[in-house]
Amino acid sequence: MGLTKHYGDKVAVDGLTFTVRPGIVTGFLGPNGAGKSTTMRMVLGLDNPTAGSVRIYGRHYRQLKDPLRYVGALLDAKAMHGGRSAANHLLCLARSNGIPRTRVDEVLHLVGLTSVAHKRSKGFSLGMGQRLGIAAALLGDPRILMFDEPVNGLDPEGIHWIRHLMKNLAAQGRTVFVSSHLMSEMALTAEHLVVIGQGRLLADTSMAEFIRQNSRSYVRLRSPDRERLLDVLHRAGIRAAARRGGALEVDGVPAERLGELAAAQQVVLHELSPQQASLEEAFMQLTAGAVEYHAHAGGRPVPGRGMPPRPVVPERALSGGAPPGGWGAGWQRKRS
Ligand SMILES: Nc1ncnc2c1ncn2[C@@H]1O[C@H](COP(=O)(O)OP(=O)(O)OP(=O)(O)O)[C@@H](O)[C@H]1O
Ligand SMILES: [Mg+2]
């Protein structure tokens, strides 16, 4: 509620109010520096809000007894004791949260780290670190899960696995809140979106509605008799834009009507396809004014306020090969 965070003069989060609901995956989007990680840290009580508050089951995170049983989170995958083994790291977390040690093996298996369970996490690759972070989040079998860029560093199979894991967790009635810059992945995973820019709420809506509201939809037509088709459209008062390769694009007229018009005049169509913009296009459209760190094609970079310039929507490097120890097939819920 009215969540606000200032770092000196910098307003990182600015009066955010939203509720993340159970049963669906909610995507948390925003350009670099928008305030996503700061918001997530405030949920976990790792940062104190300048104003406003975050409640989990009506309580502050710090008031929760054995918090890992309520909220599991992956924030910074490197935030662990590098000298400890994966199993030891999880065991320490389990002990301090009243979680049985058998659960440690379960989550290690789930994330595919069983074979390196006793290796020091210092030598882990980026993707292995992410997996360990996810194991920690799942440890307490919590009803609320929060992941900050969980697919960062995961190989394609890992990304696929994460997508199904999140959907399964949500299908079990859990609350799943996840940030990512991989728009194509987010489009497949999230049902609802919370979008922020420069700390402020830009959208809190369903995925379908978000794309519909923030992008252009049109119909693409192709005909071997393009001139006649143009003529038919023109006489019906419909404007068509010519595109390369002979295609025509029409805005604001349903495909059904265009098909019927062409049929009535016996114009052969080779294509009649409604086009919907991607989540990425819709996101760029909505956040265009809220991007702080612009990248430039070549030339001298222009630094954004005190920070090195970063790409608007960075392509996360995918690293690593197949995971050691194979994959957990998905989230099997076991109550111990
Ligand atoms: N500890 C801090 N001290 C000062 N400024 C900070 C601190 N943490 C974050 N900020 C600033 O707050 C703003 C929001 O940062 P935050 O990390 O929450 O963004 P983000 O949405 O997670 O971005 P990204 O997509 O790059 O992860 C940024 O401008 C950042 O520079
Ligand atoms: Mg962040």
Image (cartoon, rainbow, N blue to C red):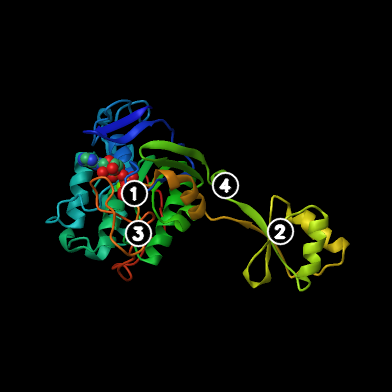
How far apart are the two marked residues, 3 and 4, measured between alpha carbons?
A: 31 Å
Report the disc number at residue 296: 3
Q: Quadrant of ligand 1?
A: top left
Residue 26 position (above or below residue 55) = below
Residue at image position (28%, 68%) is 324
Query: In screen coordinates, is 258 left or right of 183?
Result: right
Label 1 lies in ligand 1 vicinity (Cβ under 8 Å): yes
How far apart marks 4 and 1 lie (CA) works out to 23 Å
Mark 1 or 2, nearer chain start:
1
- In space, the residues marked 3 and 2 are separated at their CA atoms by 34 Å
**Residue type highlighted by circle 4:** Ala
Between 146 and 11, which is closer to the camera in this rendering? 11
Q: Residue at x 42, y 36 (%)?
A: 201
- SS of the residue at dot 1? loop
Residue type at mark 3 is His
Q: Does the numbered disc 4 mark a residue whose Cβ is under 8 Å from ligand 1? A: no
Return the disc, 3 or 2, that comes first in the chain's sequence: 2
x then y, percent, for residue 97: 23, 39
- Give whichever of 137, 130 is nearer the camera: 130
Q: Nearer the viewer, mark 1 or mark 2?
A: 2
- Amino acid type, callout 2: Ala
* Disc 2 target residue: 240
Pick whichever of labels 2 and 4 is earlier in the sequence: 4
Task: Find residue 208 and name its label.
Answer: 4
Give the mark, 4 or 1, whose residue is nearer the N terminus. Answer: 1
Would residue 280 be seen by someone viewing this image from the given angle?
yes
In the picture, measured across the screen, residue 4 lies left or right of residue 246, that is: left
